[in-house]
Image (cartoon, rainbow, N blue to C red):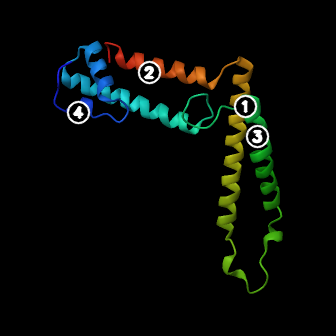
Amino acid sequence: MTDRPTDRATESALFNADAVEEIRRISRLPEAELVILIGAFEDIGQHFRQVILATPTSFALGPDDVSGNERCKWLEDNALRHIDSLLDAFGKQEMFAPYPLQGSNELSEDEWAELRTGLARLHAYVRSLQDDIESRIGDRSTINAELRFDLVSRLAVTCSPEM
């Protein structure tokens, strides 16, 4: 291995100098194209890192893996049930009326509408997420396998000669 001056390709947040050198060796790309390839790998890696950091998986980073059934039950018990309760409570807006002379903290009609709209959107999102998880359970699909497949597919597309 030859000593190379620090260049843009070796200045990678996700890849150490040895990994960059290995990519350089395998790809045999000119330096300018190598920089572009490493940049594309960086973008893909950062995307998947964010997904893994936010999603229950069996990967070392991020939240602990949870089965689809456990996630659906948790969403039902800890999100949907409470959202439904709040939406029902907001139907009794008179219960939220302030005492006389205490109106400084009172919510406007627009604020009440914004809260109801936000909760309804959150409810729809959680229900859609549950449906998605349940369909994956039925397909015997796992988030881990899907992430691996998607990662390899994106890397393959990035490395294809047409790109």
- Identify residue type, mark 4: Arg
Disc 4 versus disc 2: distance between alpha carbons?
Answer: 22 Å
- Identify residue type, mark 1: Asp
Q: Residue at x 74, y 41 (%)?
A: 75
Above or below, 31 against 74 in this view is above
- Residue, disc 4: 8
- Residue, disc 3: 74
Foreground: disc 1 or disc 4: 4
**Labelled disc at residue 78:** none
**Kind of element beneath mark 3:** helix
The first of marks 2 and 1 along the sequence is 1
Question: In which quadrant will I find the N terminus?
Answer: top left
**Labelled disc at residue 154:** 2
- Identify residue type, mark 2: Arg
**Kind of element beneath mark 2:** helix
Disc 2 versus disc 1: distance between alpha carbons?
Answer: 26 Å
- Residue, disc 1: 131
